[in-house]
Each structure stands twice: as C-alpha cells, then as structure tokens.
Image: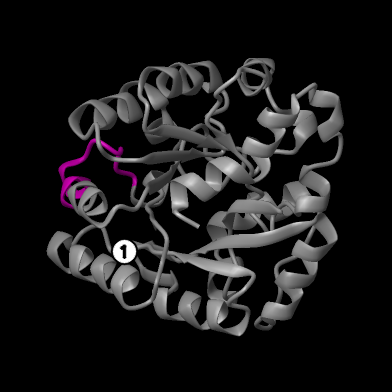
Amino acid sequence: MIVDAWMQHGTVRFLRHEMLDSLWRWTGQKPPEEEVPVETTVAAMDAGGVGLGLISAWYGPEGALVSNDEVARFVAAAPDRLAGIASVDLRKPMEAVRELRRCVGDLGFKGLRVVPWLWERPPTDRLYYPLYAECVELGIPFCTQVGHTGPLRPSEVGRPIPYIDQIALDFPELVIVGGHIGYPWTEEMVAVCRKHPNVHIDTSAYTVERYPPELVRYMRSERHKVMFGTNFPMVTAEHALRGLDGLGLGERQRAAFLEGNARKVFHL
C-alpha cells in the first residue's frame, strides 16, 4: 500500500488564498469555488494507488485556513483512508502546545506541521521550541517545508542548513520530516538527513521526473529516509509517480519510499 505523507483536503478559504495563485498558474488549474467533498480526494488517491493519505491543517498569521477540527471531520468521513496532521498558531506557544496535545490525544492526529514561510520565521525561531519539546514528549514527528517557496512568500526560511541542522542538534530526539525535498538545496537536505538519524525527507510537490540526481542517488542507498508525498491537490499521486520504475530503486528501497518509512515515522 502507498502512503502519501503530505496532502491537503483544502477548504475554499485555503485553496483560494492569494498566496497559492502561483501554484494554480503553474498547474494550469483553477481553485474550486465550492467546498470539495472528501470523496473527491479519496477518488484521486484510488487513481494513484494511495491507500492512506496524511492530510494537514493549515494555520497562519490570519488564523485557520484549514482548522484542526475541519481535518478531524474530513478524517471521520474516510477513517480507513485518511489520517490527520495538526497545525497551530505559532505566535501563542502555550495555547499551541495545548492544542497539539488535544489533536494527538483526542483527535488521534499523527504529527505536527508548521510551514515557516507562512509565518516568515525560520525553524530556529524561539516560538517553535516549546512545540519541538512537546512533539518529543508526544512521540510524533515535526513536519515542515524545506527548499524554495512556490507560493508568493519568501524562500530563505526553507534552507536545510543552518535551520534543520540546528534544530536536529538542539533536539536530537525530535523526528523531523522535511517536505518538498529541499530544492534548490537538495544536496544540503540529503547531507542533513545522513548526519542526523531522526531527520527524513518527503517528496511532496515534486513528480518523479523532477527529482534531482542527488536525491535519486540517496534513494538508491540501502537505508534511505525518503518517503512519498504529493502536496495534493496541487499534484496527484497518479501524476507524481509516473516514471517510478525508471529510478532504478531496489525492491527494499522502493517499499521504504512508498510505505515503510512513513509507517515508521508516523506510527501508522
């Protein structure tokens, strides 16, 4: 079974946000004008062979673009196919910690995602640190974006070095998933992943044909820590996985990429 480590079942207020205009332009799509039924997301998963999708909440400076409770409702509509990833208001650390505890303890969410470019604060900002400690205590991964920012926001906060490297040094027990492969700093991201045992990469927002050579070389290694992701609905699994056989992955490496690494990291 394929696990998709980064998906959204977006609300209209998220999907029509001006920051995503560039992504819709690149994909040649238009954002929906009405709320999308969960069945549409599940159908796209079926078309790409995805058995389980991790769908994320989105919180930014203007509030909840996709709230944790909305994600919980989406998961409840397809509990065998979807699992939740929490997000929080970074500016209110104690409220954020309590909300994360609620999401994991009451809603059964599998991780936390905070996207640094949305806050224009790098992952080493002090506001993240209570959340890192709580992720360790809860036994869940911290998921974030590395690499340049496709939406209309600054990219510098997505650098793997120094940011991901530093938080892995400060919190060696913290499991970190860097989504969007780190391009154009993919080699940095691979280096950080090799250096720190609890740092991982997901391939969301990229199709197989666009994987940089340094990522593919790492994926061919015996114990790589790369997992599959799409960034749906911007990219579908069917499109993202086209050409997978051409990567030259061994059977064990392929299984780890499509399912095994995500199952381990998110305790699925």
- Establish if 169 lies above or below 41: above
The residue indicated by pointer 1 is 88
From this viewpoint, is residue 68 visible?
yes
**Where is residue 209 shown, x and y percent of the image?**
80, 30
Name the kind of residue labelled 1 in the image.
Answer: Val
Q: Which residue is drawn at 59% across and 56% down?
A: 20
**Where is residue 201 shown, x and y percent of the image?**
52, 34
Q: Which residue is drawn at 23% across and 25% down?
A: 169
User: Quadrant of the rendered structure where residue 8 is?
Assistant: bottom right
Q: Would residue 129 be counted in the magenta stretch?
A: yes
Q: In this view, does 254 lie to the left or right of 200?
A: right
Q: Which residue is drawn at 18% across and 45% down?
A: 129
Instruction: Read off the magenta span.
Output: 120-130
User: Quadrant of the rendered structure where residue 104 is?
Assistant: bottom left
Q: Residues within 10 Å of mark 1 (few under 14, many from 20)?
A: many
User: Is 182 or 112 nearer to us in this picture?
Assistant: 112
Q: Residue furthest front?
A: 252
Q: Which residue is drawn at 42% across and 60% down?
A: 110
SS at mark 1?
loop
The quadrant of the rendering that contains the N terminus is bottom right
Q: In this view, does 201 lie to the left or right of 174?
A: right
Q: Is residue 221 left or right of residue 141?
A: right
User: Is 160 or 79 nearer to us in this picture?
Assistant: 79
- Establish if 139 lies above or below 16: above
**Where is residue 182 shown, x and y percent of the image?**
52, 29
